[in-house]
Amino acid sequence: MKVKYLVVASMAAITLFTPLAASGAPVSRVVDLPSGSLGLYQGYLPLLSCASAHNCAVGGVELNAKDVQTAFVATERHGTWQRAVVLTPPNGFQASQGVTLTSLQCTTVTECSATGQYGTPAGQFAFTVSEVNGVWQGGSRLKLPTNAAVTSQFASPHAEWCASPGYCVTVGTYVDLAGATQGFVAFQTRGAWGAAHEIALPTNANLDPHLSLTQLSCRTTGDCVAVGSYTSSDSSTQGLVLPEVRGHWLRGRALSLPGNASAFSGASASELTCGPTTCTIVGTYLTYGGSLEPMVSQGWGTAWGRAQTLTLPSNAARNPQTLFYGFSTGVSCDASNTCALGGQYLDTNGHYQGFLAVGTRGRWGRTTELILPSGAQQAGHNGGVVSLSCVSSICHAGAAYIDAHGLYQAFLVTRTSSGWHPGTTVPLPRGAASVGVDGGLYSIECSSAATCVASGSYLASTTRYEGFVVTLP
């Protein structure tokens, strides 16, 4: 993994649910990249969105026949996956500087929205692109706030949420006239994107806040939260919460950290999910002893309590170097506010392992080490838990580990009311031996306990990465 949903209607359904390991191996198939493609760029296929069962889309970045980065989307219609299409960037695009896709949201079978970044002689700029009636339109440059730099720009949207076709919101970062990295928010109404507006940061933000935005989630239109990190006036990195309440984006606030946090905490909010009544933020911080630990905070709007430390497994190193991958599905909560999260830590033997944790109504217990198959060496520096999905107290988690031959493999584990069950190694398409250092499962989304899809990338040859989707039985 490059650093950088399940529905069960009743208790009877829960009783009948069979963990993946006992219900047969998942089925994998190749994502057909655009004609002439040289493969995925650095295994980058992080985006997955499903409008309904068997109607999904995946998005990422591939290398075209000229070895240039291009953004693409592949679509599943009524259970049939179609060849990926290249997304067209706005006029002024300089091919040699490439294109990156950063978000993908599908609200109906034929209506999706995506955002990304493209290069021009004046720098990197944000763009938006929409699928209308099943056809992807040409990309449009997102107009940045009035104080944006005209040259040496490095603007990028980071996350998006759509209420319905043509009604979306995106957040991102840009460089202002003084050369500082600031944040923006932009809205799409009736299919048209308006100019972006600068986000107000906490009053203690540095002149250059070095803003980083990682996630955006909304309960409904006008009630959203964005998270990330910023640099304060004392040059320390702080976790950031940016709330939108009743249609108004309020000034951002620093995430209140656990009591053992260092004054220079290096804190960051990496993952976010919002349910009907609350949101859950997952991130990391440095203790006063210099240990990088995991934390979780729950709240909404302006009401956020102090984050609490998650207790890692007993074999965690003194400094576990905790990592959350930040691909938007590292934490998931169901309607009853039962949540699960996952990441990576360093153990006392110097090995990287995956971990999982479950919280119920804000109460989190000790984390659980990801149990690997017999013969596995460790989760690995590019392994551990990456993506999760939970509904009705049943969760799936996508992970990676290093097998007995030193090769990275994709891994799926399931949690039911009786706990986490033994996992399943994902069979790769065309007999491939490994997902590689940059590959693995990035996202999982399920429309029911029996209808799920996961997406990611694998190593098809020595240097070529291909995309794949996994149907969960």
Image (cartoon, rainbow, N blue to C red):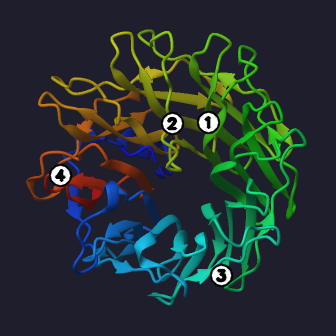
Could you say where residue 132 lies in the image, as x and y percent from the top left?
A: 53, 88
Q: Position of residue 306 (x, y in %)?
A: 78, 26
Q: Residue at x 44, y 24 (%)?
A: 345
Q: CA distance from mark 4 to mark 2?
A: 24 Å
Horizontal side, residue 190 vs residue 352: left or right = right
Residue with the mark numbered 2:
324
Amino acid type for the residue under numbered disc 4: Leu
Circle 1 packing at 10 Å, graded few (<14), some (14-19), many (20+), is many
Residue 186 occupies quadrant: bottom right
Spatial distance from mark 3 to mark 1, Cα to Cα?
A: 30 Å
**Picture layout, residue 141 above or below residue 360:** below
Label 3 with label 1: CB-CB less than 8 Å: no
Residue at 55% from the left image edge and 85% from the top image edge: 92
Q: Which residue is mark 1?
A: 282
For numbered disc 1, what is the local secondary structure? strand
* Residue 468 quadrant: bottom left
User: Please, which residue is most extreme toward the left here?
Assistant: 431
The residue wearing badge 4 is: 428
Q: Earlier in the sequence, mark 2 or mark 3?
A: 3
Name which of mark 4 and mark 3 comes first in the sequence: 3
User: Three-letter amino acid code at disc 2?
Assistant: Phe
Q: Which amino acid, by three-letter code, is at mark 1?
A: Val
The residue indicated by pointer 3 is 166
In the rendered structure, which disc, 4 or 2, sits on the residue that comes first in sequence? 2
